[in-house]
Each structure stands twice: as C-alpha cells, then as structure tokens.
Image (cartoon, rainbow, N blue to C red):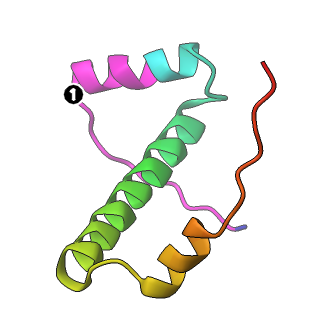
C-alpha cells in the first residue's frame, strides 16, 4: 500500500477528541482517522440501504431466506 502525507487543520477540540481515541486503544492518530473513515463509509452505506428499502421494500428472496433459517439456542 502506498501512502501520501496529507496536511490539514483540526480545531483544538477535535484534536483532543482524536487523541482521546488514541489513548483508548487506537494505535496512533492515523489509525484513529482510518477507523473514523471506515465508520463513516458504513454509515453512508447504511443510509443508501435504508433508502433502497424505503423506495423498493424488502427483497422477497432475502426475506424468505431469513424466515427459513434456524437460529441455534444460546447457552446460558
């Protein structure tokens, strides 16, 4: 994977939030920003999927598959 150096400005508040993510387990600022991008991509895809369901309804094949699946009991 090739990388490029990118310079951008963050407010003091946003930088503190970023550093908090690092303090709570992210490897570094780059990893924290990468994680944020992944979450944002998932949010966008979720919105897209929700719009598809809103305009087209459920997929009959997917619904049939889901209703015919056996869900194993969870052990306590």
Q: Which residue is at the front of the view, 36 or 11?
A: 36
**Looking at the image, which residue is at 45% across and 15% down?**
20
Residue under pointer 1: 11
Circle 1: element type: loop
Say which residue appears at 60% left-offset and 76% top-offset: 65
In the picture, which quadrant includes the C terminus? top right
The part of the chain drawn in magenta is: 2-19
Residue 19 x %, y % = 46, 19
Residue 30 inside the magenta-drawn segment? no
Q: Is residue 18 above or below residue 51?
A: above
Q: Residue at x 53, y 32 (%)?
A: 29
Residue 60: give x, y in percent of width and height.
44, 85
Horizontal side of residue 34 vs 28, given as left or right: left
Observer-nearest residue: 40 or 47? 47
- Could you tell whether 23 is left or right of 16 in the image? right
Extreme right residue here? 75
Q: Give above or below for 41 relative to 10.
A: below
4 falls in the magenta region: yes
Q: Is residue 41 left or right of residue 14?
A: right
Report x, y in % for residue 39. 44, 48
Residue 2 in the image: state x and y as whole percent: 68, 67
Residue 4 against residue 22 in the figure, above or below: below
Tell me which residue sits at (24%, 85%) in the image.
Answer: 56
Drawn side of residue 9 relative to residue 33, left or right: left
Q: Is residue 49 above or below residue 61?
A: above
């Amino acid at each position: 994977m090739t990388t490029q150096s990118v310079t951008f400005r963050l407010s003091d508040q946003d930088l503190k939030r970023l550093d908090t993510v690092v303090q709570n387990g992210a490897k570094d600022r780059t990893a924290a920003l990468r994680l944020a991008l992944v979450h944002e991509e998932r949010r966008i895809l979720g919105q897209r999927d929700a719009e598809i369901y809103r305009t087209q309804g459920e997929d009959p094949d997917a619904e049939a598959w889901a209703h015919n699946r056996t869900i194993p009991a969870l052990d306590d």
